Amino acid sequence: MSRARDARGGRSLSDRIAVRLDDSTVFGHRIRDVRAELNRRMVPNHWSRLFGVVAMASLVVILVTGLLLMFFYVPSSETVTTTTHYPPLAGVETSKAFASTLQLSLDVQGGLLLRQAHHWAALILPAALVLHLLTTFFTGGFRRPRRGQWVLLFLILIVSLVGGWSGYALPDDMLSGTGLRIVEGIVLGIPVIGTWASGLLFGGEFPGEIIEHLYPVHVAVVPAALIVLIGLRALAGWTRKPPQFRGVGRTEENVVGIPLPNAAVRAVGLGALVCGVILLIAATVTINPIWAYGPSSPGDASAGSQPDWYTGFLDGALRLIPPGWEFEWLGHTWTLALLIPLVVVSLFFAIVALYPFLEEWITRDHRDHNLLDRPRSRPTRTGIGVAAVVFSGTLWAAGSADVIAAQFHVTFEGVILFFQITVLAGPPVAFWITRRAAIGLQRRDLDILEHGFETGRIVRLPGGEYVEVHAPVDGAERARLLAGVAAGPSSAGGLTDGRSEESELDRRALAGGSH
């Protein structure tokens, strides 16, 4: 044994010094109390929590690469002559924004990697947030006392979309210029205030000073808003216990999982892995090659251009309304082809943000919920979620109607007609199918609870009857299956699903689980 070991306790010298500091100093007492509090906090160990880690890792990549890009990018619409070594664009008059982005991409070592990592992370961030919202919705993690956390998560998504769109326009290439021209048309189409709003946004006639206006939004307003919103959500999560799925030993009052320090180490490891994957993608997959698009030109547009995926639903909504729908009122032209998409999308976002309050009002369920639901246990809510996914997914796909028509050699009008029918009929059909499927899964779970699992082994009874042997359900599996039906139909209201037949099935399952 080493001489540094304590012969009585077998502790090393460093351990004894740490214990002495803990016991004899105020700072040591504070560290010990914080460490004990962190170890007491349990975090449920479930894969659905990983989407938040992916979003945070993407945000870290965005902030770090964005900070480095600021040293090279020039946010100016002033015209200059390019000095790049890329022959097709050498000596071409472009904006300083495009020229600096081109120089960063082709003449600065590692510049293209920075740009592409920034862009890929900006695409992954909203995807992770959308998946986080969906898992929270389908498991009921938005209910009281976490309604505010749902609203904060939704606002984080909206701010990230604003940040992505504002950054999309900064290179001032042909693709971003086409997108800005579409935005100008939408803003001008707003009755009464359209002209004023367009002048405020662009600083005059298109393209105006849009680069100078979007740059502070992208590098200051959006990051500050994200940091504040994420901080508020983290604070709300710290003051409330994390939700968990039903299971053996899990109640509304306790949390079963791993200590917070262990969960933090896992999150850091996953975050590092996500950052590495983003850098690998950025190093191997080209995105937004502005040297191929060329500089923005107000009189030109890129054929077959597509926006970043997270804004495709807005483009699709504009395409699905027949052109020419407008009328004169109060001395202004009201263009329904623009107003209807704006109103529908705004209403959809409002319903998403306020859904926790709407469900609580309809069901009259004002209790706190710390146990999550399996999607099948709430067929109506699950059906609503799938209907919303079908609705938004149809709008998103409609944004690529021209590309679909060209690739599949069908008429553009036929593709638009298909999406017009789908956006109206798809959500109710998806709701009905999903609700019936969830109820069917509940009944299958109830059958397993009552009879056990099928083994495929057929035996003959003494009386000559043939029956299949069923394996009994163990305690952990019984708790998991009960989670799909125990929170199911009730008399609380429409969103808790149910007819009397399904409620009776739930009571039979619960009665069977008590034996």
Image (tube, rainbow, N blue to C red):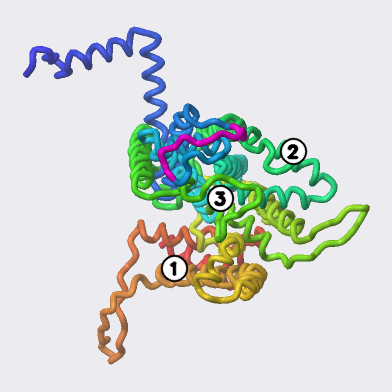
Can you identify the residue that label 2 sits on?
Answer: 204
Classify 114 as above or below 325.
above
Given the image, on which type of amino acid does mark 2 rest? Answer: Gly
Can you identify the residue that label 3 sits on?
Answer: 175
Where residue 153 sits, quadrant-wise, is top right
Given the image, on which type of amino acid does mark 1 rest? Answer: Asp
- State the residue lying farthest toward the bottom: 464
161 with respect to 463 (left or right): right
Q: Residue at x 49, y 52 (%)?
A: 131
- Answer whether residue 83 is magenta in the image: yes
Where residue 430 sits, quadrant-wise, is bottom right
Q: Earlier in the sequence, mark 3 or mark 2?
A: 3
Span shown in magenta: 76-87
* 2 vs 1, front mark: 2
**Cα distance in 3D space between marks 1 and 3:** 52 Å
Mark 3 lies on a secondary structure that is helix
